[in-house]
Amino acid sequence: MDRGLVLARSMHSSSRWCGRFLIVVAALAVTLWLIAQAWVAVFPLIMALIVSSVLWQPTRFLRDHGWPSALAAAATLFVSVAVLAGIFSTIVPSVVDQSGEIIDRAGQGIIELQTWVAGPPLNFDNAELLDFASQLRTALEDRASAIAAGVFSGVAAVGSFVVTTLLVLALTFFFLKDGTKFLPFMHRYTGRYVGQ
């Protein structure tokens, strides 16, 4: 057999595999780009699927024992939210109790800082400290718009978190309630081998 023919076939096969690899990489890059563009919508969907997979076993147990699917999904979701709220309610009081101690220590830290700045090696007197505080206040007033923008972006982030959480809860409810109907629905339109 001619070696040139063997090499040509090998190169032809390698080039086909390289072409397939490049197509797969390009498709993956486009898919990731589309997910990044629609991340606000995709993230709640992914989180709802994760939460649904965790809560599916209790929901199925209730459904197997005669509960309607909507009631089983709602009960499971309500109990899980109540458990999470209970966990947070046990953590929050200890954090609130420690907040007074944090404020006291911050005040002590400011007093120690003033004492250190007034002593050696810096030896700042009260007039210089007041001048520095005045300059700092002026700088903060000049940056008030940037600070306000930061506050508004923080409020927007909190609002986005609340909306995302509510959307995850709603999607989780519907996934738990109607999740078993999804594959038969897909099989009606795409054939019975999809999803197997």
Image (cartoon, rainbow, N blue to C red):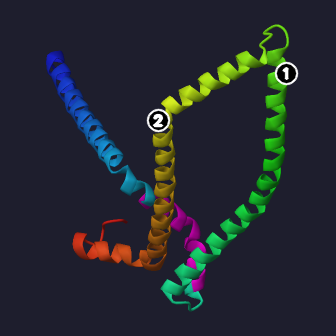
Q: Position of residue 46 (x, y in %)?
A: 45, 57
Query: Marks 1 and 2: in contact by CB < 8 Å?
Result: no
> Looking at the image, is 11 positioned above or below residue 180?
above
Q: Position of residue 82 (x, y in %)?
A: 66, 72
Q: Position of residue 17 (x, y in %)?
A: 25, 33
Label 2 or label 1, whichever comes before in sequence order: 1
Magenta span includes 47? yes
Q: Residues within 10 Å of mark 2 (few under 14, many from 20)?
A: few
Q: The C terminus lies in which quarter of the figure?
A: bottom left
Residues 9 and 82: in front is 82
Quadrant hosting residue 31: top left
Q: Residues within 10 Å of mark 1 (few under 14, many from 20)?
A: few
The residue under the point 55% across, 72% down is 56
Residue under label 2 = 146
Q: The N terminus lies in which quarter of the figure?
A: top left
Q: Position of residue 57 (x, y in %)?
A: 59, 73
Which labelled disc corresponds to residue 115?
Answer: 1
Residue 49 appears in the figure: no
Q: Residue furthest front?
A: 127
Amino acid type at image mark 1: Thr
Residue 164 appears in the figure: yes
> Looking at the image, is 33 positioned above or below residue 157?
above
In the drawing, does residue 128 fall left or right of residue 42? right
Amino acid type at image mark 2: Ala
Residues 71 and 121: in front is 121
- The Cα atoms of the two marked residues, 2 and 1, are separated by 32 Å
Segment colored magenta: 45-62
Quadrant hosting residue 83: bottom right
Magenta span includes 140? no
Which labelled disc corresponds to residue 82?
Answer: none
In the drawing, does residue 38 fall left or right of residue 56? left
